[in-house]
């Protein structure tokens, strides 16, 4: 398997180490997974099943705001 070298500052390295430790994985596997998610993002398994899952009477679509209520934009 190919290898890659990264040059990062100590603050970032500490964050990476903590994130990998939190997920009980190696730094290499954690970084590889982050790269995969960034390059080829995907939704979690069964994500599409969430559509229409909220059955709460208080959950309502807000009224559409008319464009006249928008702020005047600065001319560039």
Image (spheres, rainbow, N blue to C red):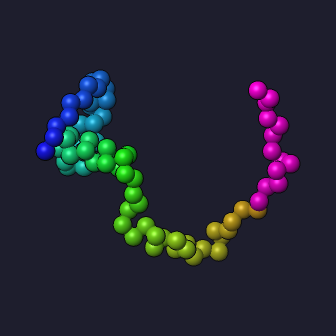
- Hey, which quadrant is residue 4 in on the image? top left
Q: Is residue 73 magenta?
A: yes
Q: Residue furthest right?
A: 68
Q: Is residue 76 visible?
A: yes
Kindly report the secondary structure that dominates the magenta region of the rendered protein. Answer: loop
Q: Residue furthest left?
A: 1
Residue at the image point whose x is 82% and y is 54% from the top: 66
29, above or below 5, in the image: below
Where does the image place residue 29, in percent across and percent down from the top left? 20, 46
Q: Which residues are magenta?
A: 64-76
Q: Quadrant of the N terminus?
A: top left
**Residue 23: x percent and y percent?**
25, 49
| Front residue (pair 56, 6) | 6
Instruction: Give the number of marks.
Output: 0
Question: In the figure, 46 relative to 5: above or below?
Answer: below
Location of residue 68 in the rendering, given as x and y in whole percent from the top left corner: 86, 48
**Foreground residue among 36 and 53:** 36
The answer to whether any part of residue 21 appears in the image is no
Magenta residue check for 66: yes
Percent coordinates x, y for residue 61 in the rendering: 69, 65
Asked whether, in this view, residue 14 is left or right of residue 73, the answer is left
């Amino acid at each position: 398997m190919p290898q890659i070298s990264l040059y990062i500052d100590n603050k970032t390295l500490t964050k990476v180490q903590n994130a990998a430790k939190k997920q009980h994985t190696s730094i290499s596997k954690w970084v590889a997974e982050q790269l995969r998610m960034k390059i080829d993002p995907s939704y979690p398994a069964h994500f599409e099943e969430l559509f229409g899952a909220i059955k709460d009477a208080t959950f309502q679509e807000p009224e559409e705001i008319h464009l006249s209520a928008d702020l005047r934009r600065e001319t560039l």
